[in-house]
Image: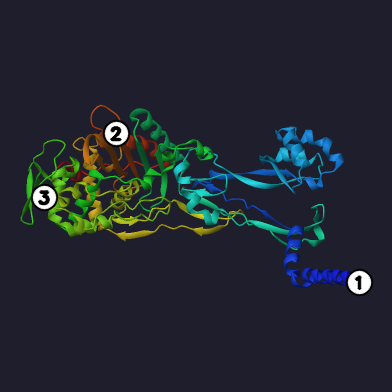
């Protein structure tokens, strides 16, 4: 009896000790476990903001989709005959539904991406264990239109590239959430709903892109692809006075609705990421700088047939011209795009001034556009220049820029010498249309004087003339100023005679520029050399002609006889 007594006493003491541990010592731990079993935290996604062009045309929006599933703990016997009907409505196998209903899990997802009408059909079945929550699929109504500008949002809701990535902070909104208690059958106890925060939908973004402009340049890009089968190409259109981009496209492209079906190289925005030697389009930097520093005048003459030239006591070889040329003044050096002439002007400028103006025109640093993936280009520091750099950089070699940098260097001439910050977002607004943030034009710096810029514009008119390298860019009734470029590509460390980059960058009307258009084609396939004046200039003309009608740009008055005479010199 004593043994039994001691056994019972110890047993009760053990129970008391265990109860003390559970109720006092480990109380906080088990309380948390209990609360986690009862309390459920539900998140509610926010609607991502829309993206429109400058006229309110939708470029990116969302479609509501439901993620649906079954809670096996709530399924009752009278619900099971409805399961075959559920499987048929959702378009899935009955075995999948039956396994979910017989499982011991709280909730099993059956299908995602269910549209609202299908979800309502399932709700009409009145299944107690069936419920879902909304998700928002990103949709691009215009397909591949402005794909590289837009970027895309993947299935996990992560933004990739373009405006989607750049403006993600404003577009994504803020998720909502709700904390509730559930009973033993996992049913919500509404009276114990403790905290609820409604989702805050994202803001909308209005771009400077004009869909009619974008459509026109993409049509011309298709023509480039069909005719020349290039490795790549870029077209940019902007307003020189504001810096706003009206159109930007690349080849090859992709459809952001089906981004996973395209190779990775198609997703790259070549206009801001690909570096290339600008070639003769860089000559506007060299000659503008020399005119600004009064090192030359339009009447200054240079021997463009010389093989060498003296620079700081050393005889340096000059680059070759595409065709033999003799003595030319500055007007003809631009019009005929003389490499030797540009080199001789650069040597008169000197290394320090050449490097300084290349930087001032935007080479060697990002433009500030803000789209992800932008390259700063390449402008070597003076200490890394070799003996030949001073003869090669003035003609657009030994320096690398993106199509966007080349474009905005020309825009500086069109904008009275002021370099603007490129912009593609005009404003941010809420669902009621109220403006939250406005993006105003942002000038960077005065690179050259207005007088020098206007003089350069007059000189660049001769490029688009029968005497120049781009007569195919002429538009009847309009003065076009521009510059061609034909760059030899580096293949295995050597300049190739068969691989070229053809470019043309111009603006019009030259006296009061409304648009700057750049066309760059990487390695066009055709018989002979793909000169910029042959490949890119006609595309410029086709784009400009259509945009004149769209933007209602009136023709300019005929130039005076004195100006005509000066331009023909």
User: Neighbour class for label 1 at 10 Å: few (<14), some, many (≥20)?
Assistant: few
* The C terminus: image quadrant: top left
The image position of residue 231, as x and y in percent, is: 34, 35
Residue 58 disc label:
none
**Residue 281 sits in quarter:** top left
The Cα–Cα distance between marks 2 and 1, rounded to whole angstroms, is: 107 Å
User: Which residue does the numbered mark 3 point to in the structure image?
Assistant: 300
Q: CA distance from mark 1 to mark 3?
A: 122 Å
Q: Position of residue 372 (x, y in %)?
A: 43, 51
Residue at the extreme top: 527
Comparing labels 1 and 3, the label whose residue is closer to the camera: 1
Say which residue label 2 marks.
Answer: 535
Q: Which residue is mark 1?
A: 5
- Residue nearest the viewer, comparing 491 with 61: 491
Q: Residue at x 35, y 48 (%)?
A: 404
Element under label 2?
Answer: helix
Label 2 crowd (10 A; few <14 / some 14-19 / many >=20):
many
In this rendering, which labeled residue sits more in front, label 2 or label 1? Answer: 1
N-terminal label among 1 and 3: 1
3 or 2: mark nearer the eye: 2
The residue that appears at 74% across and 62% down in the rendered structure is: 33
Q: How far across and down, in percent of the image, does residue 120 sit? A: 75, 40
Q: Is 303 left or right of 366, judged from the image as shown?
A: left
Q: Residue at x 33, y 30 (%)?
A: 228
| Res 234 seen here | yes
Q: Toward the viewer: 535 or 442?
A: 535
């Amino acid at each position: 009896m004593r043994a039994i007594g001691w056994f019972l006493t110890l047993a009760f003491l053990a129970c008391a000790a265990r109860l003390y541990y559970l109720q006092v010592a480990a109380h906080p731990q088990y309380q948390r476990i209990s609360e986690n079993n009862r309390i459920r935290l539900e998140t509610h996604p926010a609607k991502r903001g829309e993206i429109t062009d400058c006229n309110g045309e939708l470029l990116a929006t969302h479609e509501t989709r439901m993620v649906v599933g079954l809670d096996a703990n709530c399924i009752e016997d009278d619900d099971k005959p409805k399961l075959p009907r559920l499987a048929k409505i959702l378009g899935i196998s009955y075995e999948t539904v039956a396994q979910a209903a017989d499982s011991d899990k709280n909730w099993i997802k059956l299908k995602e991406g269910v549209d609202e009408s299908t979800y309502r059909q399932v709700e009409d079945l009145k299944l107690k264990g069936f419920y879902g929550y909304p998700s928002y699929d990103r949709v691009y109504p215009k397909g591949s239109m402005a794909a590289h500008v837009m970027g895309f949002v993947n299935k996990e809701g992560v933004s990739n590239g373009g405006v989607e990535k750049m403006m993600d902070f404003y577009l994504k909104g803020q998720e909502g959430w709700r904390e509730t208690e559930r009973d033993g059958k996992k049913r919500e106890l509404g009276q114990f709903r403790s905290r609820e925060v409604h989702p805050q939908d994202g803001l909308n973004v209005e771009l400077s892109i004009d869909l009619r402009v974008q459509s026109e340049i993409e049509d011309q890009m298709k023509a480039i692809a069909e005719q020349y089968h290039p490795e790549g190409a870029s077209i940019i259109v902007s307003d020189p006075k504001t810096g706003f981009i009206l159109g930007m496209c690349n080849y090859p492209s992709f459809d952001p609705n089906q981004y996973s079906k395209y190779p990775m190289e198609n997703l790259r925005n070549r206009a801001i990421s690909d570096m290339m030697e600008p070639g003769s389009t860089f000559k506007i930097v060299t000659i503008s700088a020399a005119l600004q520093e009064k090192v030359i005048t339009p009447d200054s003459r240079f021997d463009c047939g010389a093989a060498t030239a003296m620079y700081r006591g050393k005889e340096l070889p000059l680059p070759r011209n595409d065709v033999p040329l003799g003595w030319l003044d500055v007007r003809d050096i631009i019009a005929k795009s003389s490499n030797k002439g540009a080199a001789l002007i650069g040597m008169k400028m000197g290394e320090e001034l050449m490097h300084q103006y290349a930087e001032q025109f935007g080479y060697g640093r990002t433009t500030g556009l803000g789209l992800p993936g932008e390259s700063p280009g390449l402008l070597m520091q003076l200490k890394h220049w070799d003996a030949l750099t001073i003869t090669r950089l003035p003609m657009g070699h030994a320096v690398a820029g993106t199509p966007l940098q080349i474009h905005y260097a020309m825009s500086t001439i069109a904008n009275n010498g002021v370099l603007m910050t490129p912009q593609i977002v005009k404003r941010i607004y809420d669902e009621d249309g109220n403006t939250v943030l406005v993006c105003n034009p942002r000038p960077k710096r005065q690179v050259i004087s207005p007088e020098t810029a206007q003089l350069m514009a007059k000189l660049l008119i001769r490029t688009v003339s029968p005497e120049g390298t781009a007569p195919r860019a002429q538009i009847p009734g309009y003065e076009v100023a521009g510059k061609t470029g034909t760059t030899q590509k580096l293949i295995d460390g050597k300049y190739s005679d068969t691989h070229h980059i053809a470019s043309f960058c111009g603006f019009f009307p030259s006296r009061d520029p409304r648009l700057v258009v750049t066309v760059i084609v990487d390695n066009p396939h055709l018989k002979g050399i793909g000169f910029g004046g042959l490949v890119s200039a006609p595309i410029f003309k086709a784009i400009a002609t259509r945009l004149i009608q769209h933007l209602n740009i009136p023709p300019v008055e005929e130039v005076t006889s004195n100006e005509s005479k000066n331009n023909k010199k």
